[in-house]
């Protein structure tokens, strides 16, 4: 197709990524060359989500799109993060890739940041889920028979970490928690649904609590970028395969 966009897809492994990918795979004008994921080099786990690299690889193999890992140190500072990402984006541009696809829904600062960084190398962003109602999005996700498990949650959501996401579970979330966790309240691992040729098997491992420096409220750029403010805690449910 003459007007086909050659793209990378920023794959976190969670529900929003799965739903955004579901949508763009039905668009004949889009061709996805890579699923791109940032992985913490020290632990071989998906940045912030904490999912093992082996499960990430299993997802990509089941989807059938090549996985491209960007390896990062644990909690890199902004300057280091930008430098690494610029290098990889330049490589993508040299390969003829023109667009980068994200599962973001409503974080304006994050969108502006992504678009600015892509523009530096002459690329553009696509946001398939942008400004969608998050209650409707999670309903659509489940109606399409996707399944996902909460693998990371803020400290006040400990009871939800390690649980399969359902409409009933969402109804039990505190009223100030976005049903898609779009403000970083929780992260998930998608393991079943139409984009997967086969389900991703796993078993529950250890649940651990970790604290990080909390990003500034006016600088909501990346969950996995360091800042020098107060600590914030997260529960992680390890998944073993």
Image: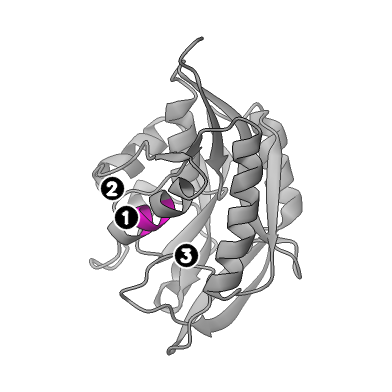
The residue where tag 1 is placed is: 179
Q: Which of 214 and 237 is in front in this view?
A: 214
Q: Give the alpha-carbon distance from disc 1 to disc 3, as whole Å.
A: 20 Å
Q: Are marks 2 and 3 in contact (CB under 8 Å)?
A: no
Is disc 3 surrounded by few (<14), some (14 to 19) or many (20+) residues within 10 Å?
A: some
SS under mark 3: loop
Disc with the residue nearer the chain's start (2 vs 3): 2
Res 171 quadrant in image:
bottom left
Q: Are marks 1 and 2 in contact (CB under 8 Å)?
A: yes
Residue at x 68%, y 38% (from the top left corner): 60
The residue where tag 3 is placed is: 222
Residue at x 60%, y 63% (from the top left corner): 83
Is disc 1 surrounded by few (<14), some (14 to 19) or many (20+) residues within 10 Å?
A: many
The x, y position of residue 74, in whole percent, is: 66, 73
> Which secondary structure dominates the residues rendered in magenta?
helix
The residue where tag 2 is placed is: 134
Res 109 quadrant in image:
bottom left
Q: Is residue 159 above or below residue 195?
A: below
Q: Do the residues labelled 1 and 3 touch (CB within 8 Å)?
A: no
The x, y position of residue 163, in whole percent, is: 50, 58
Q: Is residue 181 left or right of residue 152?
A: left
Q: Which of marks 1 and 3 is in front?
A: 3
Disc with the residue nearer the chain's start (1 vs 2): 2
Disc with the residue nearer the chain's start (1 vs 3): 1
């Amino acid at each position: 197709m003459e007007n086909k966009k050659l793209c990378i897809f920023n794959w976190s492994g969670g529900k929003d990524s799965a739903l955004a990918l579901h949508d763009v795979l039905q668009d004949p004008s889009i061709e996805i060359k890579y699923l791109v994921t940032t992985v913490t080099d020290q632990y071989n786990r998906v940045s912030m989500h904490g999912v093992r690299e082996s499960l990430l690889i299993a997802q990509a193999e089941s989807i059938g799109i090549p996985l491209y890992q960007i390896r990062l140190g644990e909690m890199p500072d902004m300057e280091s993060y930008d430098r690494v990402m610029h290098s990889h984006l330049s490589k993508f541009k040299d390969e003829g890739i023109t667009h980068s696809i994200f599962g973001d829904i409503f974080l304006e600062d994050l969108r502006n940041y992504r678009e600015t960084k892509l523009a530096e190398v002459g690329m553009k962003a696509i946001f398939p889920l942008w400004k969608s109602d998050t209650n409707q999005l999670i309903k659509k996700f489940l109606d399409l028979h996707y399944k996902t498990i909460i693998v990371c949650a803020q400290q006040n959501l400990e009871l939800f970490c390690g649980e399969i996401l359902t409409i009933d579970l969402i109804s039990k979330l505190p009223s100030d928690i976005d049903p898609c966790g779009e403000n970083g309240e929780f992260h998930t691992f998608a393991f079943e649904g139409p984009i997967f040729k086969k389900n991703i098997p796993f078993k529950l491992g250890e649940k651990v609590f970790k604290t990080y420096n909390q990003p500034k409220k006016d600088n909501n750029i990346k969950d996995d970028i360091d800042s020098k403010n107060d600590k914030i805690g997260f529960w992680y449910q390890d998944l073993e395969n």
